[in-house]
Amino acid sequence: MALKHSDLRQAVIDSANFLVRIGAISMSHHGNFSVRVPGTDTILLTASSSFDNLKPENLALLDLDGKLIEGEINPTNAEIVHMHAIVYKERPETGAVVHTHSTYATSFAIASRALGCSYEALVRNDMAAGVPLAKYGPRGSKESVSNIADALSATKNTKAVLLENHGVLAFGADPAAAARANLIVEEAAQMAIFAEMLGGAKMIPPELLRATVNRRDEFARAGVRKA
């Protein structure tokens, strides 16, 4: 019998595979991915802690209070349910959340540093405020979840949070958008680290952030040009 929400399950698998393929993930391929079932307060969450060999049946259905409704979930991923749920609660427009230990972004997290907006792609992907740092708390604990909520509350214009001493949490309208947010944060962190050798990354001036967004939107409204 076909699994419920097969299209959502496949979208998660495709997006997780994308992150593995481009290398925006740690060597272990550790991560977890969730997607909101549209019109509900339920999510499908990868039930194992690796993006290797994901299959549609490897996603469990839970509500935002962490109650398991369908499927099964291993202990490692059961720990992080509320880490995902808090993003959906704080940002109701969110359709998908991904967590990785991508190398460069996680380097900022373990250095206890937020990621400033020095890379134009952050602006163009709705992260003009950069990527805030959520203070450390044991993985998935009430303290950790509260710290994520605080970071989201303090930084409205972002699509990701760095988890101190842990990794990255990125989100978007759908799995592909969440994966792209993870990728952009990883690129920005990599370039910022390399820029340290040249005197340090320079932040985009605040008055130019809006100009960059306006230019993006102007061309988007014009649509595809054809000869």
Image (spheres, rainbow, N blue to C red):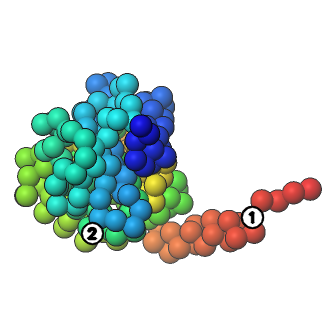
Quadrant for the C terminus in the image:
bottom right
Residue at 13% in and 49% down:
140
Q: Nearer the viewer, residue 159 or 210?
A: 159
Of the pair 145 and 116, the residue shown nearer to us: 145
Q: Position of residue 89 (x, y in %)?
A: 26, 67
Instruction: Name the spot of residue 165 as percent of width and height, x first.
Output: 16, 43
Q: Who comes first in sequence, dot 1 or dot 2?
A: 2
Type of the residue with mark 2: Glu
Q: What amino acid is at disc 1?
A: Gly
Q: Residues within 10 Å of mark 1 (few under 14, many from 20)?
A: few
Image point (47%, 68%), residue name: 205
Asked if 50 appears above or below 6 in the picture, the reply is above
Residue placed under numbered mark 1 in the picture: 223
Kindly state the secondary structure of the residue where label 1 is placed.
Answer: loop
Looking at this rendering, what residue extends furthest in the right direction?
227
Residue 159: x and y in percent read: 38, 59
- Residue 43's place in the image compared with 16, above or below, is below
The residue pinned by badge 2 equals 90
Q: Quadrant of residue 71?
A: top left
Report the quarter where the N terminus lies.
top left
| Residue contact at pointers 1 and 2, CB within 8 angstroms | no
